[in-house]
Image (cartoon, rainbow, N blue to C red):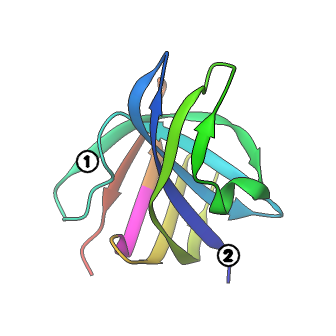
Amino acid sequence: MPRFVVHEHIARKAGLHYDLRIEVNGILKDWAFRKPPPEEIGVKRFGVAQPDHDIYWLNFEGEIDNGYGAGVMRIWDQGLYDLVKMTDNSITLELHGSKLRGRYKLIKFKDGWLFFKLKA
């Protein structure tokens, strides 16, 4: 079963944000959100896709010394997920984390992605 992680990232340039990373074919697909991921139905978060990351980042916690992402990163949540459906503009996941549990959806818009929890 593939893995996911959400990092709470306090970057020196970008400030506090949350990175959702899901394992797909040996790499991590990545989205950044200004607010914590939704734990309840009805809460939506708008974010931006980021470049793919190496699988190494699944367990990373610590300080990034330089570059655009310089700052402190810690794991906010992590676990396994089931891929329910994936298209170019939409991803439906069943997340099995300690905080994020249940079915979630990412929908692509012109300027970014919307992330929210679905009804069971």
Q: Which residue is mark 1?
A: 44
Chain-order first, disc 1 or disc 2: 2
Circle 1: is it few (<14), some (14-19), or many (20+) Cα within 10 Å? some
Q: Does the stretch in magenta take in 104?
A: yes
Task: Tell which residue pokes out farthest to the top in this image.
Answer: 13
Left of 110 or right of it: where is 24? right
Left of 22 or right of it: where is 24? right
The N terminus: image quadrant: bottom right
Instruction: Give the amino acid at mark 2.
Output: Pro
Please tell me which residue lies in front, 76 or 26: 76
- State which quadrant residue 34 falls in: top left
Rendered view: 84 above or below 73: below
- Say which mark, if any, is on residue 4: none
Disc 1 from disc 2: Cα separation: 24 Å
Please tell me which residue lies in front, 95 or 57: 57
Q: Residue at x 49, y 15 (%)?
A: 13
- State which quadrant residue 86 falls in: bottom right
Is any part of residue 88 visible from this angle?
A: no
Q: How many marks?
A: 2
* Residue 35 on image: x %, y %: 29, 40
Rendered view: 69 above or below 92: above
Point out the stretch of residues depicted in magenta.
Answer: 100-105
Main secondary structure along the magenta-highlighted residues: strand
* Residue 90 on image: x %, y %: 53, 53
Circle 2: is it few (<14), some (14-19), or many (20+) Cα within 10 Å? few
* Residue 111 on image: x %, y %: 47, 23
Q: Which residue is mark 2?
A: 2
SS label for mark 1? strand
Please tell me which residue lies in front, 63 or 58: 63
Q: Residue at x 64, y 55 (%)?
A: 60
Left of 32 or right of it: where is 119? left
Instruction: Give the amino acid at mark 1.
Output: Lys
